[in-house]
Amino acid sequence: NSETDMNNRFQAQLNARLALDKMRREVHCASVATPTGVSSSVTITLPSYCKTGSGSITWCTRSNGTNRYALYRVVGTTCTGGVMWADYLVPTSSATACSGALCIFNYTAQSTASLAKLGVDFPVNVKPSKTVELYELQDDIVLRNSTRS
């Protein structure tokens, strides 16, 4: 049981790291994102020269059980279909459940002083009842192709 538990935690954490890596590459190449503020999804616009694709890409969370959410990457502007990149995301004090999804994104638009920035928080826990096993990935990713306004 311990070995299975450890393997499940390792796999969930690895998938979250891979999702963050993929998202980081796309966000660095993106020119704009929506919506501003805290949300359960973010849609980025990728120029044609981005290696991972072009056009609108939506990263979003959807419920995948009781207090369990999954992260999806969808081509387009809605959170339907797509490919699941991470599972076992759970609500925490910094990442709260909001209307059937998990708010893990915090987008700040560009200003005269700085480029646009997307904050992400991936709280991963295969057994949410054991809060000590929480693994949390957090990052602030700058949209390098945004312009200071």
Image (tube, rainbow, N blue to C red):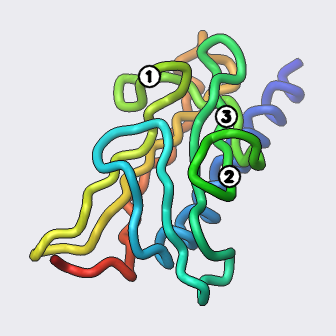
What residue does disc 2 label?
A: 74
The residue labelled by disc 3 is 70
- Foreground mark, 1 or 2? 2
Quadrant of the frame with the C terminus: bottom left
Q: Amino acid at mark 2?
A: Val
Above/below status of 93 relative to 139: above
Q: Quadrant of residue 110?
A: bottom left
Q: Position of residue 22 (x, y in %)?
A: 64, 64
Looking at the image, residue 57 sits to the left or right of residue 147; the answer is right
The label number, if any, that marks residue 71 in the structure image? none
SS of the residue at dot 3?
strand
Question: In which quadrant of the rendered view does residue 129 lie?
Answer: top right
Residue at numbered disc 1:
98
Q: Earlier in the sequence, mark 1 or mark 2?
A: 2
Q: Amino acid at mark 1?
A: Cys
Structural distance between the alpha carbons of marks 3 and 2:
13 Å
Instruction: Identify the secondary structure beneath mark 2.
Output: strand
Helix, strand or loop status at disc 1: strand
Question: 148 or 7: which is nearer to us?
Answer: 148
- Name which residue type carries label 3: Ala
Q: Residue 70's spot in the image, x, y percent?
A: 67, 34
